[in-house]
Image (spheres, helix red, strand yellow):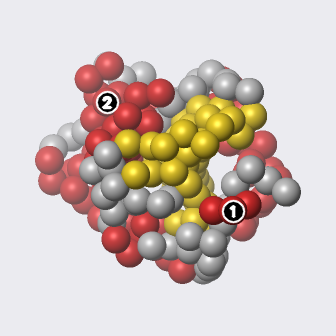
Amino acid sequence: GSALEPYASRSPTGVPVALVGTINPVTTDQMNESRARFGRRLQYLELDIATALSTIEGAADEIKRLRLLVERALSEGYPVILTSSRALQPVSQEDSIRIVRILSEVINDRAILSRINALFVSGAETAGEVISTLKAAGVVNHGKFSEGIPWGIFYGGEAGGLPVVTKQGGH
């Protein structure tokens, strides 16, 4: 059995979601491998950073657009990778943080969180932003999913009880 098995029943009909904030060659290869392995069953959703970074309204529009797509995928039982198109366009550190906050806000929705049975977060700063956005008190560490990839359970907030696997982008 898997180390996550005891927590798989948080949402019996739930679906895993990956929030990928760090874009680098390792993460890109991992996402491509997942897409190849799962095919059309995996919903790969990208934040349009040009729109999201343009104005406050642009960010709100992108959050709304992606929430609808995430809700649809989860309601149909499809796992989701939520990421950005920034691999196509270099961004400043400040914009990188804004992108991660916007991606985190996409899942900061009661209807979405109720359909997620596990959250996978890639990128050290991404994990911190997700915890902050979801207003979780923190993550109770339950060990390592594999070397360099800890997992735990969100404590407090709307995501309380949700298993979360985190990894640095380059792992």
Q: Distance between the Cα atoms at labels 2 and 1?
A: 33 Å
Please tell me how crowded label 2 is: few (under 14), some (14-19), or many (20+) other residues with Cα within 10 Å: some
Q: Secondary structure at mark 2?
A: helix
Q: Residue at x 62, y 78 (%)?
A: 12
Could you say which is closer to the camera, residue 39 or residue 9?
Answer: 9
Q: Is residue 156 left or right of residue 17?
A: left
Mark sitting on residue 97: 2
Q: In which quadrant will I find the N terminus?
A: bottom right
Q: Please provide percent x and percent y for residue 165.
A: 59, 44
In the rendered view, would you say 14 is above or below 134?
Answer: below
Q: Which mark is residue 135?
A: none
Q: Which residue is mark 1?
A: 6
Image coordinates of residue 13 in percent, x first then y, are 62, 79
Could you say whether the residue bearing mark 1 is in a helix, strand or loop?
helix
Q: Nearer the viewer, residue 22 or 4?
A: 4
Q: Amino acid at mark 1?
A: Pro
Which is in the foreground here, disc 2 or disc 1? Answer: 1
Q: Going 34% across and 55% down the picture, which residue do you hit?
A: 156
Give the residue drawn at x 62%, y 22%.
170
Q: Is residue 71 left or right of residue 96?
A: right
Count the labels in the image: 2
Can the viewer see residue 43?
no
Mark 2 vs 1, N-terminal side? 1
Q: Position of residue 3 (x, y in %)?
A: 74, 50
Mark 1, residues whose alpha carbon is within 10 Å: few (<14), some, or many (≥20)?
few
The quadrant the C terminus occupies is top right
Q: Amino acid at mark 2?
A: Ile
* Residue 39 occupies quadrant: bottom right
Q: Position of residue 140 (x, y in %)?
A: 49, 43
Image quarter of residue 17: bottom right
